[in-house]
């Protein structure tokens, strides 16, 4: 029997939604927002009876710490094509994450018409890109032991305080143990890169997520996925970040939007 991947082990839940926030998927001891979204979405997906998240939004209510937690979920409406599910993750008597998602079957063909205003980011080969460091200024990014995040060399200068002033971060994503990137893992992908605002005039630090929405547009082809994240507006202690994820066949497989707090030391 094949060993379970680290991601699948860390997002495993009982049928009743009971599970654990695993250590090692965190930034300075706080669980990564994309990991928490994928962890909760696994139970929402099971409750929906559909194989794929199509659109999911999470509002982050408190930092997630390693330890037991519970995801409660209920179907709001089950239609022919989608099932809408609401849910909440809570631990130690307090809510951590409030969610609503639509789930469906992305293996079913949709409309044949397509219009894409842009394509995948122009990236050097995977091996020529810069591995994301476990250190982010004074912040420890423990999840990098489990992920293969490779950053475009032109987007890696912030590590050495050489910021280009353009809030864009692009690169490749894969799992260190070779696990395939599927539709559930795309939720993790959309929060795995250093924030694009690190290219601006601010020190890198922990960036708490207020809200994260992911639209899953397709089932990824095998291999690492290509990603680009951009921030347009930083104001009042908040920033937005819009993401795109493209598979090895050059097809758009996910989009994301995140509202975050500007970096905390």
Image: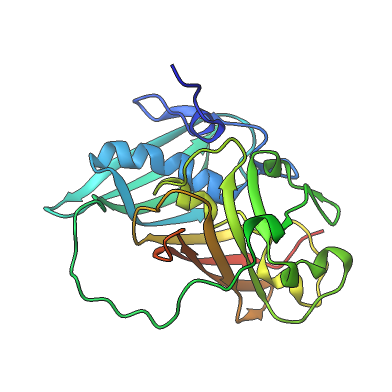
Residue 16 lies, in percent from the top left, at 35, 26
On screen, residue 195 versus residue 47, left or right, reads right
Q: Quadrant of residue 195?
A: bottom right
Q: Quadrant of residue 112?
A: bottom left
* Picture residue at 59% right of the left edge, 35% below the top: 177
- Foreground: 218 or 61? 218
* Picture residue at 19% right of the left edge, 63% below the top: 110
Location of residue 118 with respect to 141 vertically, above or below:
below
Residue 139 lies, in percent from the top left, at 80, 51
Looking at this rendering, what residue extends furthest in the top direction?
Answer: 1
* Picture residue at 61% right of the left edge, 65% below the top: 260
- Quadrant (top left, top right, bottom left, bottom right) of the N terminus: top left
On screen, residue 182 versus residue 35, left or right, reads left
- Quadrant (top left, top right, bottom left, bottom right) of the C terminus: bottom right
Location of residue 58 with respect to 66 vertically, above or below:
below
Residue 95 lies, in percent from the top left, at 51, 43
Q: Is residue 257 visible?
A: yes
Q: How is the image coloured?
A: rainbow
Q: Is residue 129 visible?
A: no
* Picture residue at 86% right of the left edge, 53% below the top: 138
- Foreground: 227 or 216? 227
Looking at this rendering, what residue extends furthest in the left direction?
Answer: 80
Q: How many marks?
A: 0
Location of residue 98 with respect to 113 vertically, above or below:
above
On screen, residue 49 versus residue 245, left or right, reads left
């Amino acid at each position: 029997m094949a060993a379970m991947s680290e991601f699948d082990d860390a997002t495993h839940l009982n049928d009743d939604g009971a599970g654990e926030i695993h250590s090692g998927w965190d930034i300075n001891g706080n669980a990564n927002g994309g990991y928490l979204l994928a962890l909760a979405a696994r139970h929402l997906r099971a409750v929906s009876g559909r194989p794929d998240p199509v659109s999911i939004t999470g509002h982050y209510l408190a930092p997630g710490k390693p330890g037991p937690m519970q995801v409660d979920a209920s179907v709001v409406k089950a239609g022919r094509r989608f099932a809408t599910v609401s849910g909440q993750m809570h631990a130690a008597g307090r809510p951590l994450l409030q969610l609503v998602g639509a789930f469906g079957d992305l293996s079913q063909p949709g409309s044949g018409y397509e219009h894409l205003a842009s394509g995948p980011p122009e990236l050097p080969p995977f091996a020529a890109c810069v591995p994301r460091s476990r250190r982010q200024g004074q912040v420890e990014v423990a999840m990098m032991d489990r992920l293969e995040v490779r950053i475009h060399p032109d987007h890696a200068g912030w590590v050495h305080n050489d910021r280009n002033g353009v809030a864009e971060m692009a690169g490749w994503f894969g799992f260190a143990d070779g696990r395939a990137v599927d539709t559930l893992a795309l939720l993790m992908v959309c929060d795995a890169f250093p924030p694009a605002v690190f290219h601006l005039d601010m020190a890198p630090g922990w960036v708490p997520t207020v809200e994260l929405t992911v639209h899953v547009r397709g089932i990824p082809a095998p291999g690492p996925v290509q990603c680009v994240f951009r921030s347009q507006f930083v104001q009042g202690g908040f920033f937005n970040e819009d993401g795109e994820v493209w598979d090895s066949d050059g097809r758009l497989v996910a989009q994301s939007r995140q509202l975050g707090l500007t970096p905390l030391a």
